[in-house]
Amino acid sequence: MRWLFSLCFIVLSACSNGGQTVVLQPAPPVAQTNSSTTTTIQTGLSNTIQTGSSTTKTASLEPVAVAAPVEKPADLPVQQLCSPLPNANLVTAPPIPKAITGRVGLFVGRFARGTKDFRLEKATWINPEGQFPLASNFKTSVLFELMRQVDAGKVKLSERFKVTRANQSYGRYPYDNTDVMGLALAMISWSDNTATDMLFRRIGLAALQPTAQRLGFCKTRLLLPTKTWWTAQAGLGGADFPKYSLVAASQRFATAPYELQLELAKRLDLRAQAVNAETLRRYLDQGYFAGRNGGVETMSQIDRNLQNASSPQEWARYMWNAFVSLDLKASGQKRFRDIMYHGKGRAYMRVPFKYFGGKSGNTARVLTYSGFLETLSGDKVIYVYMNDSSQNLITRDETDIAFKFINQALKKVIRPEDLIRPKPVKIKNETSVKAKPR
């Protein structure tokens, strides 16, 4: 009788709750509201995104676990600098050209010979601890991790990729069935966004950050493919990144614990893959690239918080690890260097070198350059240049003046004898005979 009484009690409890029956059921899909339009994103067989008055459906995408609700910014820990500035014979940096506006960060260093440690002999820097958006400079880290996974047998060089509506990003894109090395070259030499995103998703969104964590970085964030951050900056990021409170939402993302950052990144990436590339281009051109995300400082806050980011010092350390460390096998290191040789910057060097590897990056009001040099005498030199909050929306126009500034800094740290280009030696062939006309 006791079990019968208990059963009756449970039934009565369920039936008497303000006249309503309480039924436990699975949580509904995440509802995303943008003014008067409500869009529902479901993970599973299909994904739907509503932009304006049209709705676009894409093929099946890999479901991503829903992260815990994001707390307000004040409740989240603020990241602090971990890596102290290295000891070095520090020389005064050249003056920043007046044509360059906004925030500037610079790190240029010559390293001690015979060591793989981050040991500087001579250096110059400006705002080395400031955090800046990397723009396309982060693609160096995609190539580095890609070569690590090739070394480990996780990725095969023979793999080929197809451009789809889901993975096509802003800008031009490579041919279908391009292999791993073809995409890698497009990523570095052309800075192709679609090639980058296909490789980034192939190695995994969680693949890049562990290297930054292992190196003790606190200002470096490497989580988002290009189309993913563009989707948020275009105002198509949904409830996690609402268009009209993007500064606060991006700040929540930037200061969240890593596990939550990764979940938000995966969720935003799933949404980005449901956005048509032409729709993305139109929203960016009419909004973000037109300077309509707010004033200069507002845009800069969004850039710093949403895009992959680092500081001049930490990115110099990352470059050193990528070019000099033992993380890659000899074959992987050769592939990495061969691809990086084609990155932008080599033609702008005004100092002699035996080897160059570098990368550029620019978005609206943002310009970044980084490079690794081996001098004629065998010294290793790294430069990192970062600029955001520029008054110039199209920062590519500042490339010449930026490299003039970078070269001035390089000449301050490179040995004087390495700045003298050797004269070409003419070798006379004593046995040569002039060809007679026939």
Image (cartoon, rainbow, N blue to C red):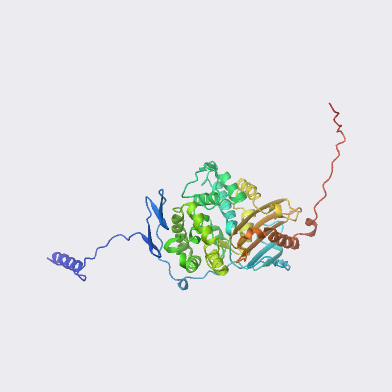
Quadrant of the frame with the C terminus: top right
Q: Is residue 208 visible?
A: yes
Residue at the location (86% across, 39% down)?
Answer: 428
In the image, 115 versus 185, the foreground residue is 185
- Horizontal side of residue 149 vs 54, given as left or right: right
- x, y (%) of residue 83? 60, 66
- x, y (%) of residue 398? 66, 60
- Horizontal side of residue 36 vs 146, given as left or right: left
- x, y (%) of residue 151? 56, 47
Quadrant of the frame with the N terminus: bottom left
Which residue is at the far left? 1
In the image, 55 versus 168, the foreground residue is 55
Which residue is at the far bottom? 74
- Horizontal side of residue 210 vs 392, given as left or right: left
- x, y (%) of residue 422? 81, 51
How many labels sit on residues?
0
- Horizontal side of residue 263 vs 422, given as left or right: left
Q: Is residue 116 visible?
A: no
Depicted 75 relative to depicted 321: above or below: below
